[in-house]
Amino acid sequence: MPAATDLELPTGSDLLLIELAREVIDANTDAGPDEDGAHTMGAAVLNADGRMFAGVNLFHFTGGPCAELVALGTARANGARDITTIVAVGNHGRGVVGPCGRDRQVLFDYHPGIRVLLPTAEGVRAVRIESLMPFAAAWSMADGVGLFDEDRFG
């Protein structure tokens, strides 16, 4: 868990982002309250210009994409290039869910400094991706896996 000093209260935009993710999964889930399904998570991202984009997961035994990755792809396909915040929400009122390890690594590599909305004992809070990835090795298409980056973690 990130240090309490790393956690921020959600902003008005954060609350709208959560609502968008919830609306998208509620409208598109294929599972009943106690059922498994291929579409059980929704995610939404906020671009720096205020536009919001959403996506739903596609569960598959081969590791289908999480809702966060679908939302990122949707944003990119619509010209968004400066993603600032992301949230995932479970179907049937399960609320905000933190990103899995794969999603954290993707966020860390492609969107340094992105704010991630998380559930905490005190309610939803925002934290920078770097706080969720202590001592992570950054990766890029140009350079592969890099060394520890003191500027991001110092």
Image (cartoon, grey):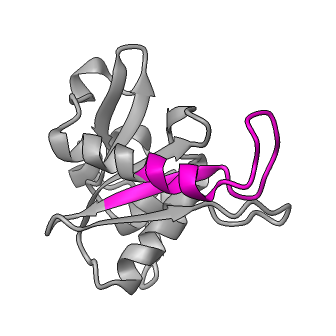
Q: Which of 104 and 36 is in front in this view?
A: 36
Residue 137 rendering spot, x and y as whole percentages: 46, 56
Q: Which residue is drawn at 49% across and 56% down?
A: 24
State which quarter of the image contains the C terminus: top left
Residue 40 rendering spot, x and y as whole percentages: 66, 49
Number of on-image labels: 0
Name the quadrant containing residue 146.
bottom left
Residue 23 in the image: above or below residue 106: above
Name the quadrant containing residue 33.
top right
Q: Which residue is drawn at 76% across and 42% down?
A: 32
Q: Using residue 151 as the reference point, say whether residue 143 is left or right of it.
A: right
Residue 48 in the image: above or below residue 3: below
Name the quadrant containing residue 102.
bottom right
State which quarter of the image contains the N terminus: top left
> Residue 15: within the magenta?
no
Where are the magenta residues, as a range? Answer: 21-45
Q: Using residue 95 as the reference point, say whether residue 82 is left or right of it.
A: left
Residue 43 rendering spot, x and y as whole percentages: 47, 55
Residue 154 in the image: above or below residue 69: above
Q: Which of 13 and 114 is in front in this view?
A: 13
Residue 82 in the image: above or below residue 9: below
Q: Residue at x 29, y 85 (%)?
A: 79
